[in-house]
Amino acid sequence: MTGNGSARQQELLEAAYAWVLEHGWAGMSLRPLAEAIGSSPRVLLFLFGSKDGLVRALLARSRTDQLAVVDAVGEGGELAEVGARVWAWLAAPEHRALLRLWLEAYTHSVTDAGDGPWAGFAARTVADWDALLAAHQAVDDPAQRVLLLAVLRGALLDLLATGDAERLDAAVAAHLATL
């Protein structure tokens, strides 16, 4: 972000974040966004430097909410217990908008091979989740963490696509029983 993190910048960032949570990243354009949040494209460009700067600020803001799962999971417990708590957080209906936003950002990041605003978002997300899971392993086993993360991410994708929490709860529980 450019600027000094003024109160107005923070206010507009929060308003833009609420808008992106509701509408997603697809087709985000400065003019409609600015109008919706009571600003102008010129003010947003001044405060954030560019549209890419605004996207970077919004990604950082969403990452703060995404990392809330670390606090929600808490400390202690074996990997299977932590996996169950992570899944409960991921599957909670109140997190769907955030997780749809995460999925969209993750997808953009995978295709952003340069230094655009999305670059590195997916890799940082994987590293965040791996660190969370590693903190709950008695014996360092990267393959076990990768597999659990793959199961959780796959179940999340299916949940966002189908809403079939019961089926996915059972699938995640079946995997967790193998840990």
Image: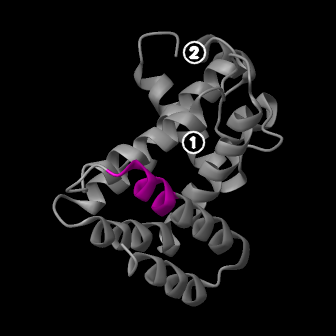
54 left or right of 30 in image: left
| Distance between mark 2 and mark 1 Cα atoms | 15 Å
Q: Is residue 64 visible?
A: no
Dot 1 corresponds to which residue? 17
Above or below, 109 against 103 in this view is: above
Q: Magenta segment: does it hold 34?
A: no
Q: Which mark is first along the chain, 1 or 2? A: 1
Label 2 Cα neighbours within 10 Å, binned few <14 / some 14-19 / many ≥20 = many
Above or below, 165 against 151 in this view is: below
Badges 2 and 1: C-beta atoms under 8 Å apart? no
20 left or right of 137 in image: right
Q: Is residue 33 visible?
A: yes
Q: Residue furthest right?
A: 27
Q: Helix, strand, or loop for circle 2?
A: helix
Q: Where residue 49 sits: x, y (%)?
A: 63, 11
Query: In the picture, residue 77 is in which quadrant?
Result: bottom left
Q: Where residue 43 sits: x, y (%)?
A: 65, 17
Dot 2 corresponds to which residue? 47
Which residue is painted at 38% across and 81% down in the image?
177
Which residue is painted at 41% across and 58% down in the image?
144
Write the start and end of the magenta stretch as one range.
141-149
Label 1 Cα neighbours within 10 Å, binned few <14 / some 14-19 / many ≥20 = many
Judging depth in this view, the residue of 75 and 38 nearest the camera is 75
Q: Where residue 175 sits: x, y (%)?
A: 47, 77
| Residue type, numbered disc 2 | Leu
Query: In the picture, residue 171 is in which quadrant?
Result: bottom right
Judging depth in this view, the residue of 173 and 124 nearest the camera is 173
Q: Helix, strand, or loop for circle 1?
A: helix
| Residue type, numbered disc 1 | Tyr
